[in-house]
Image: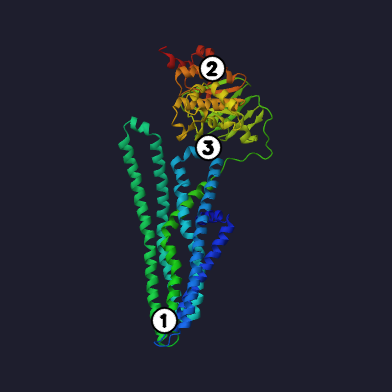
Amino acid sequence: MKKGAVWLVFSHALRYPFQMAGAILCALGSVAASLIGPRLIGEAVDAMASQGAVDFALVGRIVMELAFVYGIYSLALWCLSYLSNRIAYLTVKAMRSDLFDKMGALPLSFFDSVAYGDTMGRFVADMDAIADALLQGVSVLFTGVATIVGAVFFMLGIDPLITLIVLASTPLSILVSRFIVMRSQKMFREQARAQGVLGGYAEEMFSGQRVVQAFGREEAAAADFQKLNDELYSVGLKAQLYSASINPTTRLVNNIAYAAVGAVACLAAIDGRVTVGGVSSFLIYAGVFAKPFNEITGVFTQIQAAFASSQRIGQMMSLQPEAPDIPGSVPLKSVRGRIEFKHVFFSYTPGQTLISDFDLSVEPGSRIAIVGRTGAGKTTIVNLLMRFYELESGSILLDGADIAHLPREELRKCFGMVLQDAWLFEGTVAENIAYGRPGAVREEIVKAAKAADAHGFVSRLPQGYDTLVSDAGENFSQGQRQLLTIARVMLADPPVLILDEATSSIDTRTERRVQRAFEAMMRGRTSFVIAHRLSTVREADLIVVMEKGNIIESGAHEELLERGGAYASLYNSQFAQS
């Protein structure tokens, strides 16, 4: 998992080879300039070694060379910074795109089990953490190795014995860092997890604020949030304290080594093995050698946070997508709407069967109402029909073809759904209605809106059909949002309709008008109507009463009332006072 988290980021960065190559060249240029500079400084010191014996011509030439070298160093460093920014943001951009594509391929069961806020946290907070680490880490990565190797090479050229003292400090610095890293990684994973949980809870409370206030649960919600916030503070503080101790500790080790190098180098100069200028150069190289270690530990907090975030993103990227279509599957050329459920078994949780040996035959053009108590399995039947979930066993046939053998995308085009929860996206009213038929012309959009009884209120909007929908439709009432989704399905004109509590958010008067539109729309089409308001299912050709995932009763409205069974009981409970 650790290697996978690193490779996830690195593999996306490799998609931009020209930027990477440019960054490497700039890094090498800056390193070369930073390594040549100390050697020139040493030569300048030797040229001014004693009073009255200063070689001004040589010093002047060296100063000019230093100005040129450090000019190259500054330019290369600026270019490296620019390219590092591009690599960081291009990499995160690619990761976000892949993560979004992955989410589109995940089965509906994922979205039913993971908090929305936690998922959004991976898109925003986790991606930002990776971007921050890349901004700091790309230049350190590219310059660090070259700087260490180059510094060792130049130090060996001055004095191999003193170089060994510098190298001897490296294992100690690495061991200290590793000791702290092993204890901080767990804290950063916990911090990322706590951020996801906190984000999910905050999203739930914000989206349900009306309910929270209606029940006077503000203080309880604040108390629960405070507990989660305290947990994040606790693990976050520990993670930061652990990681913050790395840089001072490694700097302490390096400074002790630097002092030892200075003392030995001075003794070597007294002994005549090294010139004064060589000592100056060596001390600078010792600092240059330690610089990459200090830089890495200096940005270690961002690196650890990015590592934990990459693991969270990698977990989502490794999830199994929806089962691919069977090779060679072809869509139906035309759909009449005959649907058969044959010995269907299904469960959301293994070992807890919900649908057991379910059989149902629906003739083309017929209207089927599915009723029953909450949790009876009504919506599950629709989920299985649309292949949002796969069957455990049995089969569902559409015009005699097993839907498991049909392309999933083409299968879903055969159905038009109007759900209880009206979903709108940010765009114009016209774009929302045309979501299922993006190429529809304005006349077709208006016709569908009129059929759904939405044209009246849309015409009164400031910009009519060009009025913007914002905040998932919060600038419209619940009933208006529902009418727009009904218009959307009417425009798509599918061969099979699924109405899942489609008029539950509409007032009775509007419901009657929409029902008339539905009557015309359902004529000649196979239609499934899921409803708690039994007044909306009276005209159904077949009413199916479900309980615990099974059909316990079926028949026409009058027939079921005469039987006096489960349907009659449900119907009378709603109309006992009428």
Mark 2 nearby-residue class (10 Å; few <14, some 14–19, many ≥20)? some
Residue beneath label 3, please?
108
Relative to 277, is 554 above or below? Answer: above
Q: Secondary structure at mark 1?
A: helix
In this view, the residue farthest toward the left is: 219
Residue 516, disc: 2
Residue beneath label 1, please?
265
Q: Position of residue 196 (x, y in %)?
A: 42, 45
Towards the viewer: 336 or 555: 336
Towards the viewer: 455 or 61: 61
Q: Is residue 489 left or right of residue 462?
A: right
Towards the viewer: 542 or 288: 288
Residue type at tag 2? Arg
Towards the viewer: 24 or 568: 24
Q: Position of residue 170 (x, y in %)?
A: 44, 71
Q: Give the distance between the C-alpha atoms of the residues marked 2 and 1, in whole angstroms.
A: 97 Å
Mark 3 nearby-residue class (10 Å; few <14, some 14–19, many ≥20)? some
At x 50%, y 58%, the residue is 82
Residue type at tag 1? Ala
Q: Secondary structure at mark 3?
A: helix
Q: Position of residue 203 (x, y in %)?
A: 41, 39
Relative to 165, is 297 above or below? Answer: above
> Which one is closest to the eye, mark 2 or mark 3?
2
Q: Is residue 97 left or right of residue 265?
A: right
